[in-house]
Amino acid sequence: MAARRKRKVEPSSRGLSAKQVGAGTPPAKVKALMEEIRGDGGAVLAAYRDPLGEAWQVLASLPIEKVRATPYQRDLSEAHVKRLAKALEDVGRFLDPVIAVRTPDGFYETPNGRHRTETMRQIGAKSIVALVIPEAEMAFKILALNVEKAHNVRERSLEAIRMARELARIDDRPEKEYASVFEEPQFLTLGLCYEKNGRFSGGAYSPVLKRTEEFLGAKLGASLGKREGRRDRLLALDEAVAKAVKALKDRGFDSPYLKNYVIARVNPLRFVRGKAAAADFDETIDKMEKSLARFDPAKVKPADLARASGPPEVNG
């Protein structure tokens, strides 16, 4: 069957015109937010409707001490802050407003601006420009827009599990209802693994998890308990993989791809295609554990690793 072509969108057929974006009177909720911003020591620069979704939002300057990162995003990178500080000093302008939502205690939490806010703070800025969104729940959806700043598996996984805990606390709905927030179900399990072991090789297990993970129907509070069980199984499996890798190194193999090779070697789904590709998590881990128990490093040849992941270096 031929793939269905995506319907072509007519140019200039959606949302608001340029004049409509700045027209109209803000609703009461937005007016109240504008007054709160002023009361918090900020200044309202503009209130307008989003050109795509037509929702109202406020462009404002905020006291730097009133802005903080949401607690569930990726950890601060000092190297990133240092590079950004130099760039801001060279340009002499702050041209990339952060997105923020107001909290009941009068602070403004940014789900996507931790590094920009901290950089401005470190270089001595008094204020920062922010796009303040009236709907607090939007803070959990903003990270999906960060496609131009792709995080690695570790960062995305830690963000996902931190958001899951916060959402379980404030709105404990079924996990699958938050699919668009977490992006991929594997990130939740991997996030738990990274919390236990910051050096966990999540990327190496992704091919397996993509086939065995799905968003759960249970509420977040309960689903996190189930995922903790999956975390424990993955960490135990990783210990067995590490032993197999050590055995290969003891035989003289020296390659950065050894762990990936071992995991691929015991992955029962590596040759499965089509609808049968999806599999049960626990059954798959069971099979991998049994394969690891039978793994014989003496039968591995340099050519095997070369075919799997690039030429290894063999000491000799």
Image (spheres, helix red, strand yellow):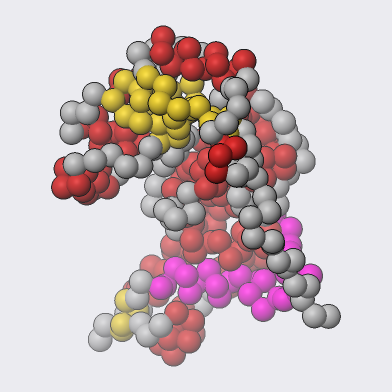
Q: Position of residue 308 (x, y in %)?
A: 49, 81
Image point (36%, 25%), residue name: 61
Q: Position of residue 281 (x, y in %)?
A: 69, 56
What secondary structure is the stretch in magenta mostly built from? helix
Say if the magenta span includes residue 277.
yes
Q: Is residue 312 left or right of residue 1?
A: left
218 or 146, which lies in front? 146
Image point (69%, 61%), residue name: 10
Residue sticking out furthest to the front? 19
The quarter of the picture where residue 269 lies is bottom right
Q: Position of residue 113 (x, y in %)?
A: 39, 37
Q: Is residue 50 left or right of residue 279?
A: left
Q: Is residue 258 above or below residue 23?
A: below
Extent of the magenta region: 257-284
Q: Position of residue 22 (x, y in %)?
A: 53, 33
Q: Quadrant of the N terminus?
A: bottom right
Residue sticking out furthest to the top? 39
37 or 199, which lies in front? 37
The quarter of the picture where residue 27 lies is top right
The quarter of the picture where residue 282 lies is bottom right
**Can residue 252 be seen at all in this image of the molecule?**
yes
Say if the magenta span includes residue 188.
no
Q: Is residue 239 left or right of residue 187?
A: left
**Can residue 229 be seen at all in this image of the molecule?**
no
Image point (20%, 47%), residue name: 91
Image point (62%, 33%), residue name: 55
